[in-house]
């Protein structure tokens, strides 16, 4: 009888735990949808209207690419890790690659000029990126962590309070359980018009007047490391790769730790970046070697994802993230 009761108790505990996990996930999903007012992704079916002469124009490498077989842009967010590996892979396979480091804007301009075989984005493509003949390949997502100075006693913020901090509605840490210390939010603005959940608020227009604006990742993290009341945000791999990461503390949001990739994979953790690459489709546009490079990058992310802090596409599909072809188009429902 005792053994039987123990068995049923174990089963009951498992069921309660499972129900709790499902309930918590549903609550967070509802909370996020209520607090965000803009879509996470642009409509993939809304293609830019371009003139016929642009559509018929072939891809022609910039003169800066020399005689390279592949010319591509690569986001500065991932350049240091992927550029040398792509170059080594190309040499092993017997072709050459010229890589231009830059931002999402760099990639959009290069696609508009039809001068690259592959373009790289560090956030969700916007409407202007959906050009005729461009095929998108989502290769993974990374958490964007909310960071404070190491000496800050706060370990967790609600999503609602975090938004109020960056709107300037909460200005002292004592208002949210911390010390009597002015809050100094810092934001790194780029890709201002792009959709996504890689910044605390839907648009830069919502930021409070007390938010300090910086242009570089290092400026952002250096400010947090030396400012007791500072708070900012940055993608997890960038934090890990900086020398001052020991002076920075990562906060949980609504009890969810961004370092635990499972929280983002389930769609519970609210902030992330999408790593997206493009190739061309069409007889006068497509370079067969481009897909070879994309497959290599995808394999690298799949095999090294955990150490890099990147969740690969295969995991996202298992967790119910929505795709439009090869591109990421929606969070789990």
Image (spheres, rainbow, N blue to C red):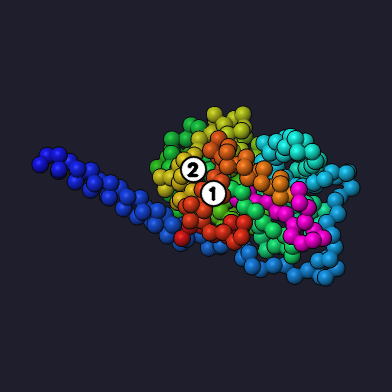
Residue 288 painted magenta? yes
Q: Position of residue 33 (x, y in %)?
A: 47, 60
In the image, residue 220 sits, relative to residue 164, either above or below, namely: above
Is disc 1 placed on a helix, strand or loop? helix
Quadrant where the image shows the N terminus? top left
**Direction from residue 284 to residue 237 in the image, left or right:** left
The answer to which of marks 1 and 2 sits earlier in the sequence is: 2
Residue receiving disc 2: 261
**Direction from residue 332 to residue 206 in the image, left or right:** right
Q: Residue furthest front?
A: 93
The magenta stretch is: 273-289
Q: Residue at x 28, y 46 (%)?
A: 14
The reply to whether residue 185 is in sight is: no
The reply to whether residue 3 is in sight is: yes
Q: Which is more foreground, mark 1 or mark 2?
A: 1
Q: Residue at x 47, y 35 (%)?
A: 152
Is disc 2 placed on a helix, strand or loop? helix
Q: Nearer the viewer, residue 113 or 90?
A: 90
Q: Position of residue 171 (x, y in %)?
A: 50, 47
Q: Residue furthest left?
A: 1
Q: Residue at x 85, y 68 (%)?
A: 53
Residue receiving disc 1: 314
Mark 1 and mark 2: span between their CA atoms?
Answer: 14 Å
Residue 83 painted magenta? no
Q: Residues within 10 Å of mark 2 (few under 14, many from 20)?
A: some
**Direction from residue 30 to residue 77 in the image, left or right:** right
Q: Residues within 10 Å of mark 1 (few under 14, many from 20)?
A: few
- Tell me whether the residue at label 1 lies in contact with that at label 2, contact meaning CB atoms closer than 8 angstroms: no
Q: Residue at x 81, y 40 (%)?
A: 96
In the image, residue 248 sits, relative to residue 65, either above or below, namely: above
């Amino acid at each position: 009888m005792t053994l039987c009761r123990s068995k049923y108790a174990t089963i009951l505990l498992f069921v309660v735990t499972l129900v709790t996990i499902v309930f918590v996930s549903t609550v967070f999903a509802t909370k996020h949808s209520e607090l965000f007012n803009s879509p996470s992704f642009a409509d993939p079916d809304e293609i830019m209207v371009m003139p016929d002469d642009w559509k018929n124009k072939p891809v022609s490498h910039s003169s800066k690419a020399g005689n390279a077989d592949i010319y591509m842009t690569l986001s500065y967010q991932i350049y240091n890790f992927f550029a040398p590996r792509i170059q080594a892979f190309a040499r092993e396979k017997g072709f050459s690659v010229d890589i231009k480091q830059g931002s999402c804007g760099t990639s959009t301009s290069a696609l508009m000029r039809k001068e690259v075989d592959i373009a790289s984005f560090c956030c969700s493509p916007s409407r202007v990126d959906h050009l005729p003949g461009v095929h998108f390949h989502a290769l993974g997502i990374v958490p964007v962590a909310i960071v404070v100075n190491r000496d800050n006693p706060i370990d967790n913020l609600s999503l609602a309070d975090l938004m109020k901090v960056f709107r300037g509605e909460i200005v002292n840490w004592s208002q949210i359980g911390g010390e009597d210390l002015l809050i100094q939010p810092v934001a790194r603005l780029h890709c201002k018009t792009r959709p996504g959940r890689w910044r605390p608020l839907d648009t830069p227009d919502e930021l409070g007047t007390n938010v300090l604006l910086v242009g570089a990742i290092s400026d952002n993290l250096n400010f947090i490391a030396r400012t007791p009341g500072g708070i900012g945000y940055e993608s997890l791999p960038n934090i890990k790769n900086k020398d001052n990461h020991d002076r920075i503390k990562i906060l949980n949001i609504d009890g969810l730790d961004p370092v635990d990739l499972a929280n983002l994979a389930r769609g519970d953790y609210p902030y992330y970046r999408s790593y997206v690459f493009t190739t061309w489709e069409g007889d006068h546009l497509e370079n067969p070697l481009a897909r070879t490079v994309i497959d290599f990058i995808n394999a690298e992310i799949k095999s090294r994802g955990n150490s890099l802090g990147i969740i690969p596409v295969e995991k996202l599909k298992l967790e119910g993230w929505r795709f439009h072809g090869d591109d990421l188009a929606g969070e789990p429902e």
